[in-house]
Image: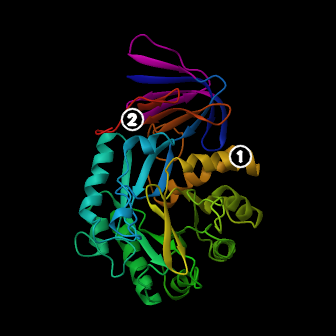
Amino acid sequence: MMLLIQNIHVFNPEYQGVKDVLITGNTIHKIADSLPVTAAYEMKVIDGTGKFLIPGLIDSHVHILGGGGEGGPKTRTPEIILTDITKGGVTTVCGLLGTDGTTRTMTNLVAKAKGLQDEGISTFIYTGSYQVPVRTLTGNIMDDIILLDSVIGTGEIAISDHRSSSPANEELMRIVSDTRVGGILSAKAGVVNIHVGDGRDMLNPLRYVLDHSEVRPENMCPTHINRNSQLLYDGIEYANTYNGYIDFTTSMDPTIPDSNDISASHAMKVALDHHVDESHITFSSDGQGSLPLFKDGKFIGLGVGKVTSLFDEVRNCVLNENIPLSTALMPVTSNPATLLKLTGKGRIQEGYDSDLVIINEDLSINTVICKGKIMIEHGKVVVKGTFE
């Protein structure tokens, strides 16, 4: 079936005006001021009057197998299901392992990614987990990236955190270097997703890598930079000095008592006010990962990250921080697509994948389209996962 979306405000994420958009299969076929309805083909027409069309969101940090375990086996969070993703307007996810690289494995991760792909969303993964040496599927980082289609990089490697392997600077440099070369040889991103804790070193290990090697800043994506104000300003300094990327976690919750978290929307406002390149800021949800609470290094409680928080923070950028919608969309569309070299993703352009989201005037999600298939329509789930 062909889809024709008529008379809708198009954000690419830059505003393009009111357009008609024709989808054939999993591709955006035509964008024009006006397109005819034809009876020659089976066509579904969607009236977009008063609504906005945005690229499908890219969530570059999702624990698709679940995460956690910091409070023992009973605190392992469950696997994600399809509608946990699509209800948030997300059409592309990058799955990874976290603290636990023992009971959650790369073979499990590959299988889960294939399952989500079969259910209708684009799915990529990172090889490894918090631990160093990195646990891979084939035996080394480079082979995983080159030989496994879904693997686009390494991660999440933990630094400045009491749960990390405390990798030496030279070890981290080798991981980033091998990941970069694997990306070069496979025409992939070759990005290391780096979990940054609240330790005193903050982003200094990344500075060491860039100062002592030939790798590029775009081969590292440090995340959780909004976990406290000290790390936020360290991230801002890092981004401005090295032209590096920084990633804000949308599941961070400043409302938790005694929390030092900063919302991703406010962190973006602060970063923009301090002249960080708007194209080098990304958001990710940490979806389905555990959000453990520690006091004096001891586990005291647990939450679960939500993929739906990704669009919530885009909305908060506009409504609470007065950031234009076109700018607020960049961290979840064009920016991660560029960083992760996701061809055909992150923009509304002819020939690109038909991953699209229609949002209402109040910035609530109306319709979600993944690879040309309607998954959410008028706010209601149309397609469910296999076991939902």
Quadrant location of the N terminus? top left
140 to 52, vertically: above or below: below
Q: Magenta span covers which residues?
A: 19-47
Res. 7 mark: none
Residue 28 magenta-drawn?
Answer: yes
Q: Which secondary structure lies at badge 1?
A: helix
Tag 2–tag 1 contact (CB < 8 Å)? no
Q: Residue at x 40, y 65 (%)?
A: 68
What percent of the width, then of the height, locates residue 81?
37, 45
Q: Residue at x 39, y 12 (%)?
A: 40
Badge 1 density bin: few <14, some 14–19, many ≥20, Cα 10 Å: some
- Viewed as shown, does residue 148 lie left or right of 317? left
Quadrant location of the C terminus? top left
Residue located beneath label 1 in the image: 318
The amino acid sitting under disc 2 is Asn
What percent of the width, then of the height, locates residue 202?
58, 80
What percent of the width, then of the height, locates residue 336?
52, 56
Res. 26 mark: 2
Q: Nearer the viewer, mark 2 or mark 1?
A: 1
Residue 356 magenta-drawn?
Answer: no
Task: Measure the C-alpha gap from mark 2 to mark 1.
Answer: 30 Å
